[in-house]
Amino acid sequence: MVDSIVLVSLVLVVVLRVIQWVSHYKDYVIDSIWSKPGALKLRELSRKLHGLKTEQRSISAQDEYARWTKLNRQILQLETQVKDAQQQLKQMRQTGEKSLSRLRLVMLTAPLLLLRFWKGKTVVFSVPQGMFPRFVETVLSQGWAAMALAPVRYVWAPGAFKPLQIETPVCLGIWIWALTRVLDTVEFVARSLTA
Amino acid sequence: MEYTVESNLHDLINSKTHKWIFVGGKGGVGKTTSSCSISIQMATAQPNKQFLLISTDPAHNLSDAFGEKFGKDARKVTGMDNLSCMEIDPSAALKDMNDMAVAQNGSVGDGLGDLLQGGALADITGSIPGIDEALSFMEVMKHIKRQEEGEGEKYDTVIFDTAPTGHTLRFLQLPQTLSQLLEKFGDIAGKFGPMLNSFTGGAQNMDIMGKMNELKANVEKIKQQFTDPDLTTFVCVCISEFLSLYETERLIQELMSYDMDVNSIIVNQLLFAEDDSEHNCRRCQSRWKMQKKYLDQIDELYEDFHVVKMPLCAGEIRGLTNLKMFSQFLNTGYAPKVDGKIIYELEEQK
């Protein structure tokens, strides 16, 4: 049971992170799923426009005025079409983006949040007692809420925390947090090395 | 059936529907001569109609072209019963505006009144970019209003001798810009209307909203008329040189983007050197060769336009007689072999 919860959490965290990694390719992802025809049309128009501009630059306006002007007219026409296509694509992308973020919310963020709420205190593994200061061990076993609740607990039962068992359990909430941190660090290192 | 376009302005000259004709192009290509010529030809071809030629160019040339003085009020051309001319003078219009403001607001001794007495409003307004075009536009609106109210002389067709391209495009953009501006203003004024009215002073009780709505309706009417090809057309004037053609193309594209009808081009100052027996010098020949190169390009680019090729005359085309002689080629087209002698006849008349 614990293994499957951990596995599900691991999958959710990693998938969320992967989606975040590909966020700069978001347009590409959205284009390939929701707005492929629009993106293809824009690419085709931009390619044509570039070709016409290159051709126009290669000729002298004064020597071949008619040809130059005809190209100019085509360029003006294409520029309008490109503008329209960009506008259409922007609308399609907005729709796709909305669907994508809704999908992410339903499929990943919400389940992970629920998991952290309901199974947050599930023990993933244990560390020997006394390895960390008592306060840290309390957070490890009961999650971040323990830190927020520390003053209340002190008022409720003043005095030092008593050891309850010989091992300190590490709960799912903290484990997910630690996993995210590790992934962040790995990403930072990878980015620094590739930059 | 193949449709061929005549290389003259016969259709336009005899048009019964056109109310607004704009004549424009780059500076120094003969816009004033062309607009005068079109007006004269139209007035001659349709003697029962009244025509008005308005110059919206801040550097007016109508008086010079006809050899008589025209002002801000329409006056008939001497020798023509149905053609009047006027030159819109932005500085005079600004002075009028200033005087009106003085009459309404300023009494001597109060600060604002003293300031306005010194012509401050005219000075400030005169420095606004595009004010010439705005005033010309206002003149057109005033003219329409007068016609609707049946005041003054009624003109069937108004021909505009416009300023160089940039000014003209701004002028023609004004209905669009004003319409958008008034639309936005309407939205805001809808919310703050009563407050705006109270700002303008309860005693005078100026109904800003009412005035704005009236202006908006007038602007819409003009916009509608300017985009109707039966009522409005634009005649481009150019010379057979690269920069002039380049600007003409820009003008045509802009006009088309405003949905304005443009299907006539007058190419001025052509040498027709091979048919000129008297002055067929080397310089004329090589210049004519260059002109022919660009003429071919014009024919290729504007095959569905009325392209009228007009000759370069030996003297200045000034005065009604010279203008009449020259303008006939707009109606019939210029045939260098047959009509060549007129180039020198013009020179003789002073």
Image (cartoon, coloured by chain):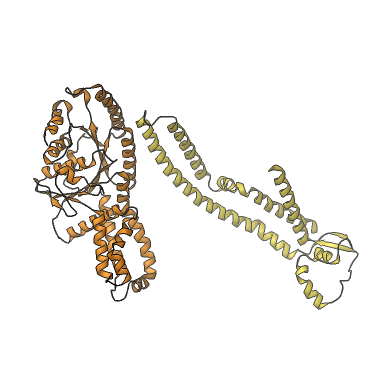
Q: Nearer the viewer, residue A170 or B145?
A: B145
Quarter occupied by the C terminus of chain B? top left
Q: Is residue A83 left or right of residue B170?
A: right
Quadrant of residue B180 within the rendered picture: bottom left
- Count the marks: 0
Q: Is residue B196 above or below residue B81?
A: below
Q: Estimate the x, y position of residue A139 in percent, counting from the top left.
A: 80, 65
Q: Is residue A61 left or right of residue B34?
A: right
Colour orange belongs to chain: B
Quadrant of residue A163 within the rendered picture: bottom right
Colour yellow belongs to chain: A
* Residue at x 86%, y 64% (from the top left corner): A133
Q: Is residue B198 above or below residue B291?
A: below
Q: Is residue B169 left or right of residue B277?
A: right
Q: Is residue B41 visible?
A: yes
Q: Estimate the x, y position of residue A84 in percent, counting from the top left.
A: 44, 47
Quarter occupied by the N terminus of chain B? top left
Q: Nearer the viewer, residue B226 or B167?
A: B167
Q: Estimate the x, y position of residue A99 in percent, counting from the top left.
A: 57, 55
Q: Estimate the x, y position of residue A100 in percent, counting from the top left.
A: 59, 53
* Residue at x 75%, y 58% (from the top left corner): A177
Q: Is residue A62 above or below residue B234?
A: above
Q: Is residue B259 visible?
A: no
Q: Is residue A92 above or below residue B321?
A: below
Q: Nearer the viewer, residue B265 or A114?
A: B265
* Residue at x 29%, y 74% (from the top left corner): B205
Q: Is residue B79 left or right of residue B113?
A: left
